[in-house]
Amino acid sequence: MKRFQAVITADMVNSTGFAREDAALWLEELIKILRESTVVKWTLKPEIYRGDSFQGVLKNADDAMHVAVLARAAMRSNSPHTDLRIAIGIGKTELVTDRAGTSDGEAFRLSGHLADHIRLQKARIGIALPVPSEPLNATLDLLETVIENWTTAQSEVIVALLQNQNITQIAESLHISQSAASQRVAASKWWAIENFLATFPKHLALYTKR
């Protein structure tokens, strides 16, 4: 039996409100972070398409929310007005080529359909599964209330935390004191994000065990 995989389809919010060079640079830097992450593994590493969007396929669907939060934090660290819409499709993949754009399967179709309609929902991270998953999506509304309040400084800290950096490393990389780093971590409500990401595989398992 084929294992469930997660297809991530994302596009920039308000990309036309910034200089084209800036938006392109921010997206390229984000793709680099995702591709080089040692925390998650990709079946197909994310690639940019249509200028302000990207798509990738994860080996383990359990990592989908980690990637989504990391991607949004990385984009939001550039400006208080930058963000992403992220459509996660979780299901089977019948055809996986060397590019997400030419691959096909349940997960690709679910992600693509959600990406076309995600503007209709309040949360900017959405999950589409082969079965109804309203309770899971309701938790994403609560997650949104945390993420939407991150400042650029707090977003920088979240990116570092999701790459397994500790307070000392964060302070050194951002050239701030450890006290300032700790304050940003607390203000970002990291404790809630960390707990949600740790328990996400259990939430997902309720819908993918079939």
Image (spheres, rainbow, N blue to C red):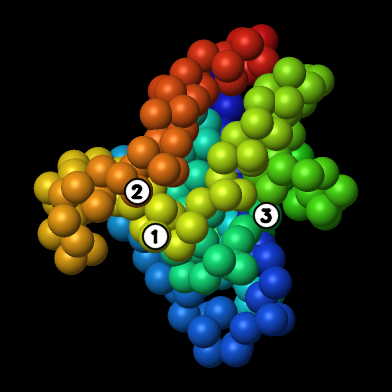
The foreground one among 176 and 168 is 176
Please determine whether, in this image, residue 45 is positioned above or below residue 182.
Answer: below
**Mark 3: amino acid:** Arg
Q: CA distance from mark 2 to mark 1?
A: 7 Å
Residue 128: quarter of image: top right
Whether residues under marks 2 and 1 lie with C-beta atoms below 8 angstroms apart, the answer is yes
The foreground one among 90 and 92 is 90
Residue 68 rendering spot, x and y as whole percentages: 53, 45
Q: CA distance from mark 1 to mark 3?
A: 20 Å
Element at label 3 = strand
Task: State which tag comes first along the sequence, 1 or 3.
Answer: 3
Q: Can you identify the residue that label 2 sits on?
A: 184
Element at label 1 = helix
Image quadrant in which the C terminus is located:
top right
Q: What's the residue at 46%, 28% (across, down)?
A: 192
**Mark 2: amino acid:** Arg
**Mark 1: amino acid:** Ala
Q: CA distance from mark 2 to mark 3?
A: 24 Å
Q: Is residue 55 visible?
A: yes
Q: What's the residue at 57%, 40% (across, down)?
A: 146
Question: How many numbered markers are drawn?
Answer: 3
Q: Is residue 194 left or right of residue 111?
A: left
Q: Can you identify the residue that label 3 sits on?
A: 85
Residue 30 rendering spot, x and y as whole percentages: 44, 64
Q: What's the residue at 69%, 81% (across, down)?
A: 17
Please determine whether, in this image, residue 70 is positioned above or below residue 3.
Answer: below
Task: State which tag comes first along the sequence, 2 or 3.
Answer: 3
Task: State which tag comes first along the sequence, 2 or 1.
Answer: 1
Residue 165 rendering spot, x and y as whole percentages: 21, 45
Residues packed near mark 2 inside 10 Å, few (<14), some (14 to 19) or many (20 plus): many
Q: Can you identify the residue that label 1 sits on?
A: 153
Image quadrant in which the N terminus is located:
top right
